[in-house]
Amino acid sequence: MKSSKLFGLHSVQAALDYSPDKIIRVWIDAQRDDKRLGSIVENLKTLGIEPEKTDRKKLDRLADGNNHQGIAMEVELPGELSESDLKDAVQVLESTALFLVLDNVQDPHNLGACLRTADATGVQGVIITKDNATGITPTVCKVASGAAETVPVYQVTNLARTLRWLKDQGIWVMGAAGEAEQTAYQVDLTIPLALVIGAEEKGLRRLTREQCDLLIKLPMSGKVESLNLSVATGVFLYETVRQRSLKSK
């Protein structure tokens, strides 16, 4: 079993809300006494979990010097789901499909940030590659701030095959590429969609690109050629939310 340390009121509350069965151990600052922390402690006790009271120095060590707000938690790491799980999920979708596909993304900070944005924008699942890519790690969980527990992550062996299958289900596959002719603001993102983002610096692989129905880009007015992967992902996803919100009205 792989485990990870979470810290801070928001991350701990997310674990309580979405994966209480994954909680292994909890530490709290013996000197801190405030309403929000007290509420979390009461919720933990309701689950039969008795937090260990300790000093701030130990919490600082557990949180690697980050702001822990008086609480740290050890949790079992969430696991990746399979291609079979993805197919089951697609078959029972009750709303317009929105999947985020990460093609060989290797930086756990980027995956964590993408998961956090995916949670905020209602993405129904994040699809990652099994080889040459990061999976769910303690760093991913920390950056995701609870989203690793709320957003399904599907790990697939053959991404091109998975994209072909998604298209067969009526889901459009759009890849992000700087050389695309159209921007995200010029295309319809309200259709069933799988948004594909390429790896850091390398972009989309050839076989992945060939499976895309359309390539789209973000307008770049400055001198830099591209945005950080997770930042660009956020812009694409929120433009999708904007378009869908307007359509629903």
Image (cartoon, helix red, strand yellow):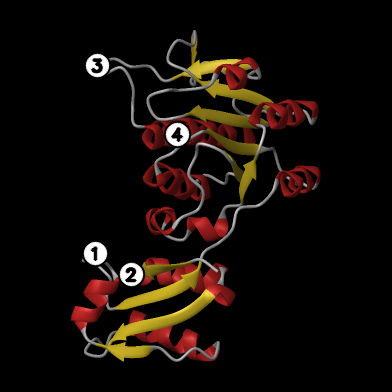
**Which sits in the foreground, 240 or 53?**
53
Tag 1 near tag 2, CB within 8 Å: yes
Q: Is residue 169 left or right of residue 172?
A: right
- Asked if residue 188 can be seen in this view, the reply is no
**Residue at mark 3 to residue at mark 1: CA–CA distance:** 34 Å
**Which sits in the foreground, 87 or 139?**
139
The circle on residue 222 is 3
Say what secondary structure mark 2 lies in.
Answer: loop
**Can you say which quadrant of the picture contains the N terminus?**
bottom right
Q: Earlier in the sequence, mark 4 or mark 3?
A: 3
Q: Pointer 1: residues within 10 angstroms few (<14), some, or many (20+)?
A: few
The circle on residue 8 is 2
**Residue at mark 1 to residue at mark 2: CA–CA distance:** 9 Å
Q: Pointer 3: residues within 10 angstroms few (<14), some, or many (20+)?
A: few
Q: Earlier in the sequence, mark 2 or mark 3?
A: 2
* Residue at mark 4: 233
Q: Name the spot of residue 11 as percent of width and height, x first.
A: 41, 66
**Residue at mark 1 to residue at mark 4: CA–CA distance:** 26 Å
Q: Residue furthest left?
A: 57
Q: Which image quadrant for residue 194?
A: top right
Q: Name the spot of residue 159 as percent of width and height, x first.
A: 64, 31
The three-letter amino acid code for the residue at tag 3 is Gly
Q: Which residue is found at the position 60% from the left and 53% from the top?
A: 80
